[in-house]
Every structure is written in C-alpha cells, then in structure tokens.
Image: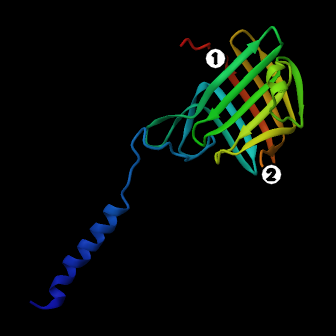
Amino acid sequence: MHPFNKLPGIIFSVCLFFACSNNSSTAAGEKTPIASLNSSGDSTYIGNNGLAYTINGRHVAIKQTMHDGDGKNWIALYSNEVKNDVATSMVIVNLTNELTKEVFNFSVANSGNSSILHYIPSISNFTNKKNAAATYMSSKYINYYGDSVMVKITSINATRVAGTFSGKFLSDDDNPVRLEITDGSFDVAFTKDKVY
C-alpha cells in the first residue's frame, strides 16, 4: 500500500483528536463561571437583592441569581448578614459576590452618611457596636480596610436597606496597597437570624 493512501485517515484522526480535546464543559457545582460580571452580554441577573461597584475600571452590577447563556442559574450575590440594630442605630451589610468571592462588610449608622477614616480591626472596634467600619476582601483573599470611605443609607424599612458607598481602602500587609472603590451601591433584604 502506498503511504499517501493512509493520509486521509491520519488527517481525520488528528482533526477528531483536536475537536475532542477542545470540547469541555463545566457541570453545575464544579466551578462557578466568571463570565460577564455585569448586566450586559449573555448573562442576565434576577432577584430582589443587588450590589454594584467599580474597582480599577472594572464595573460590576449583580443581583441574587445569574442566568447564563447556556440556560443555567448560578448564585451571584449572597447575603452573609444584613441587620438593623435598633438599639445602637447601626446597620450591618455583609455581602459576597459569589462569582468572584469578593466580600464587602459595612457597619454604619442606619440613617444618613457614615464616614470611615483609617479603620483597623481591633478589640475596641469589635466591642464598641457604634464604631463605623468598612472592609473589602478581594478575590485573592486580601483584606482591605476603609481608609477614607463614605457610606450613605438612602432608604431603610422593616425588611430592606439600600445605600451607596465609595472611597479608598488599604490592604492589610507590611506594605499597604491603596485601592479605590467607586460607584458602589446595595439594595438588599434583611437576613433572618439562623437557629442552630
């Protein structure tokens, strides 16, 4: 048999190999896609809770659930804790962007503006429930603390709280890096206390 007679079979086999090796899919639960993190593109967001912010030119606007172009639903925004402490007149808003694992945590006055300057976690800040605080954890698990942050509660009622935020944060390490977060907003329902 002449060697060129095997050429079509070899070409077919190589093409089949490359087609199969590039065909991969992600099953639900394996890995959360970081496709489009805003409301444009193939993904749409649904739900009553929302979070938006801009970091280094990357704008994110998400709601509770992301519906992707393949027809799958993913948890996009998780409310770790959202509480109104009437006794201290403070509200806690602790939210996780599940698509990137970024975490925002605010403890601020439950009305008007709260200015957070040079916040550093400490025992006194933890025990004094009236101290305003702002923290951000990046997708690389780096903690940033509010250095000059403004949080404004724009509406609050028995079931929900909404507000805006922006400012500068410093990383928690030996050589702090400054990070600016702008165009921040949240509109979320209060979480219920969990019974264990």
Q: Quadrant of residue 104?
A: top right
User: For the point 34% across and 63% down, which residue is it?
Assistant: 21
Secondary element type, mark 2: loop
Secondary element type, mark 1: loop
Q: State the separation of the CA atoms marked 2 and 1.
A: 36 Å
User: For the point 83% across and 36% down, which residue is it?
Assistant: 120
- Please name the colour scheme applied to the rendered image: rainbow
Q: Position of residue 124 (x, y in %)?
A: 85, 25
Q: Position of residue 137 (x, y in %)?
A: 70, 40
Between 42 and 52, the one nearer to me in the picture: 52
Crowd around label 1: few <14 · some 14–19 · many ≥20 (10 Å): some
Residue 173 higher or lower than 67, as above or below:
below
User: For the point 53% across and 13% down, which residue is it?
Assistant: 196
- Which one is closest to the eye, mark 2 or mark 1? 2
Seen from this angle, which residue lies furthest bottom?
A: 2
What label does residue 191 carry, if any? 1
Q: Quadrant of residue 190?
A: top right
Report which residue position mark 2 lands on.
Answer: 174
Crowd around label 2: few <14 · some 14–19 · many ≥20 (10 Å): few
Q: Is residue 132 left or right of residue 104?
A: right
**Discs 2, 1 touching: Cβ within 8 Å:** no
Residue 84 higher or lower than 17, as above or below:
above
